[in-house]
Image (spheres, grey):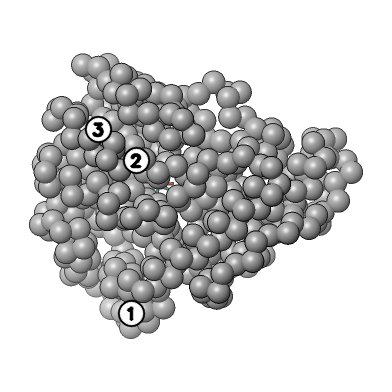
Amino acid sequence: MKKMSNLVERRFRNLVVPVAISGALLTSSLVAQPAPTLEDSPIRLSSNENAFGYTPNAKSAIIKALDSGGYYNRNDVSDLIEACAKKEGVPEDYILTTAGSGPLLMMTALAYAEPGVNVVTTEMGYTQLVRKFEERGGDVKFAPLGEDMGYDFKALKAEIDEKTKIVYICNPNNPTGVLADSAELKQFVMSIPEDILVFVDEAYLELTNSSFAMATCAPLAKLKKNVIVTRTFSKGHGMAGFRIGYAVAHPDILEKISVFGMGTPSYLAAIAAVEAIKDTEHLAKNVKNYQTVRKHVTDSFDKMGIKYAKPDGAFVYFHSGIDQQVLRDTMSENGILISGSRVSGAPESKYSDWARVSIGTKDQMDEFLNLLGGLVAMK
Ligand SMILES: Cc1ncc(COP(=O)(O)O)c(C=O)c1O
């Protein structure tokens, strides 16, 4: 065990790890896969990276394609656009691919922000779009979270005014992990006037316990010109390092935001993503792994008396009762990286003793749970 920092040492001077957690046995449906690792890395439960791996078909396709790296290979990105359009049931001009979905969030902020206008979102949510919007001189209006840290669409609507350009919704939300009620969400999206863009970030939606087909807002992009839905291959598909994602929206919106895009994705990433779309079995395995390990974590939290928001994504947001910075430092000193609250609009103290842990392999989660158990017991 590495040496603890002074701050942490003061707080947890008598820390002895690990403390045994009587975790629930995993069901036999959990698929054993070698977890990809980074050399000499701590256990990375901070960035919602996929510990179960991407489709092996992508690896062989990339190896085969390596020799043509000297060419621009735009055709491979066109093949990906075709595959995405087919998957989403939209024409190809409704798809825009980028290097991860993060650029789509930032391009949208750049296209819509200016002094005097605002973006509406929740007090706790993913901040990539709203922070870029602020940087460009726009304002951010935060609505409170609803019950159980879910969406309160009435509160969200109440924040919309004549200066609102975008409503940003992340579903399931990051960092809370809570999935919106699909009927309420769709009703909300359909009710927003056409001069306001509704941005639905579905980075984690494949991993939900509910039905993806019921929950996705992508079909609404065909019905309404002011709806954009983004997806990434970084999470469920396990390809964060490849950098590939896409948006589904009316071509007018895509044209408006593309002005701020710089270049097409790498052809190798596009090749990998096409294989990921084709290998539905692999995605289903990854989803099953996430669901199984996520349940193991929440069952363990239940046993430990730790409160958490109902998780539907690649992570669990939990109430440790320990200042999140102290908890993160302690975990980090013990070789485990987790994430803090990412409070955006809420008062600093509101979620200061909550933290977010990404779902890794069962073994990784057991190491985390053992350490957390020890820390919570010493509080
Ligand atoms: C909610 C959400 N949206 C978008 C992204 C961007 O991910 P990427 O650029 O890898 O697609 C992330 C990354 O963690 C995220 O959590």
Instruction: Name the residue: 50% across, 23% down.
Output: 346
Instruction: Name the residue: 64% across, 66% down.
Output: 25
User: To which residue does mark 2 refer?
Assistant: 181
Report whether 339 appears left or right of 73: right
Asked if the residue at label 1 sits under 8 Å from ligand 1, the reply is: no
Q: CA distance from mark 1 to mark 2?
A: 38 Å
- Above or below residue 41? Residue 279 is below
Q: CA distance from mark 1 to mark 3?
A: 41 Å
Please count the marks in the image: 3
User: To which residue does mark 1 refer?
Assistant: 61
Mark 1 or mark 2: name the one nearer the start of the chain. 1
Residue 196, x across and y down, in percent? 19, 28
Report whether 332 appears left or right of 91: right
Give the residue type at disc 1. Answer: Ala
Q: Which quadrant of the figure has residue 22?
A: bottom right
Q: Which quadrant of the figure has residue 86?
A: bottom left
Residue 356, x across and y down, in percent? 57, 44
Disc 1: CA contacts within 10 A as few (<14), some (14-19) or many (>=20): some
Q: Is residue 6 visible?
A: no
User: To which residue does mark 3 refer?
Assistant: 188
Mark 1 or mark 3: name the one nearer the start of the chain. 1
- Above or below residue 294? Residue 176 is above
Circle 3: element type:
helix
Give the residue type at disc 2. Answer: Asp
Circle 1: element type:
helix
Q: Which quadrant is home to the C terminus?
A: top right
Give the residue type at disc 3. Answer: Phe
